C-alpha cells in the first residue's frame, strides 16, 4: 500500500493506492496539529502495511519551490522520523484546484466539498506520482 499526503496549514489530506492496481483513492482528512497528523500517518503505516509514503511538495507554477516549502520540509522530516518506510516528495502543483473542480463537477456542495477537498487533492497528487512511474 502506498499513502499520499497533501500537507496543509490546517488540514492534512490522505489518499491510498494499492501497489498492484496503482489506482489512488481519497482516504481521510486529518484536521489537527502537525504532531497529531504525523501520529495518524504512523498509525496508518502500521495498520495498512504501507511500503511508501508520497508527500506533496509545494512547487509554484514556475517550477520553483513555493513559500510553503520550509514548513513542508519540517513536516517531511517529522514523518521520516516517525515511520520506517520510504518517504518521497512529489510536485503537488494545482492539486487543490483540480480537486475542487472535480468535486464541483460531481455536485458536491458547501461543507461536504470543503471536508473532502484535501483528501481528493492527496489523491490527485498520488495518482500523478504513480502515473509518472513512481
Image (cartoon, rainbow, N blue to C red):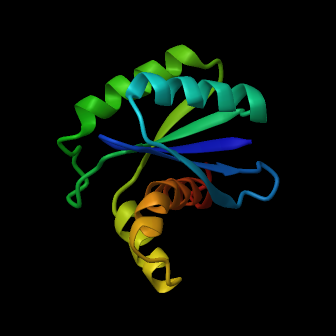
Quadrant position of the N terminus in the picture: top right
Q: Image height check: is 113 above or below 44?
A: below
Between 65 and 17, the residue placed more toward the observer is 17
Residue in the image at 61% along x and 24% along y: 42
Q: Residue at x 31, y 47 (%)?
A: 58
Q: Nearer the viewer, residue 78 or 21?
A: 78
**Quick check: 68 left or right of 123?**
left
Q: Is residue 71 above or below residue 80?
A: below
Q: Where does residue 25 sit, x and y in percent of width and height?
A: 65, 59
Q: Nearer the viewer, residue 40 or 128?
A: 40
Q: Position of residue 67 (x, y in %)?
A: 17, 42
4 left or right of 9 in image? right
Residue beneath the point at 76% across and 35% down? 48
Look at 82% across and 53% down and name the residue there: 20
The image quarter in which residue 132 lies: bottom right
Q: Single out the residue that lies furthest toward the front.
A: 111
* Location of residue 28 with respect to 104 vertically, above or below: above
Query: To which quarter of the image does residue 11 belong?
Result: top left
Amino acid at each position: 500500500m502506498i499513502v499520499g499526503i497533501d500537507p496543509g496549514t490546517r488540514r492534512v489530506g490522505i489518499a491510498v493506492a494499492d501497489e498492484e492496481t496503482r489506482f489512488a483513492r481519497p482516504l481521510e482528512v486529518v484536521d489537527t496539529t502537525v504532531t497529531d497528523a504525523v501520529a495518524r500517518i504512523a498509525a496508518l503505516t502500521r495498520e495498512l502495511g504501507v511500503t511508501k509514503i508520497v508527500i506533496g511538495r509545494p512547487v509554484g507554477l514556475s517550477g520553483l519551490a513555493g513559500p510553503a516549502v520550509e514548513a513542508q520540509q519540517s513536516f517531511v522530516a517529522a514523518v521520516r522520523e516517525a515511520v520506517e518506510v520510504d518517504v518521497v516528495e512529489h510536485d503537488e502543483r494545482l492539486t487543490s484546484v483540480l480537486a475542487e473542480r472535480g468535486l464541483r463537477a460531481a455536485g458536491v456542495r458547501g461543507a461536504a466539498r470543503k471536508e473532502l477537498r484535501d483528501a481528493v487533492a492527496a489523491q490527485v497528487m498520488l495518482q500523478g506520482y504513480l502515473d509518472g512511474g513512481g
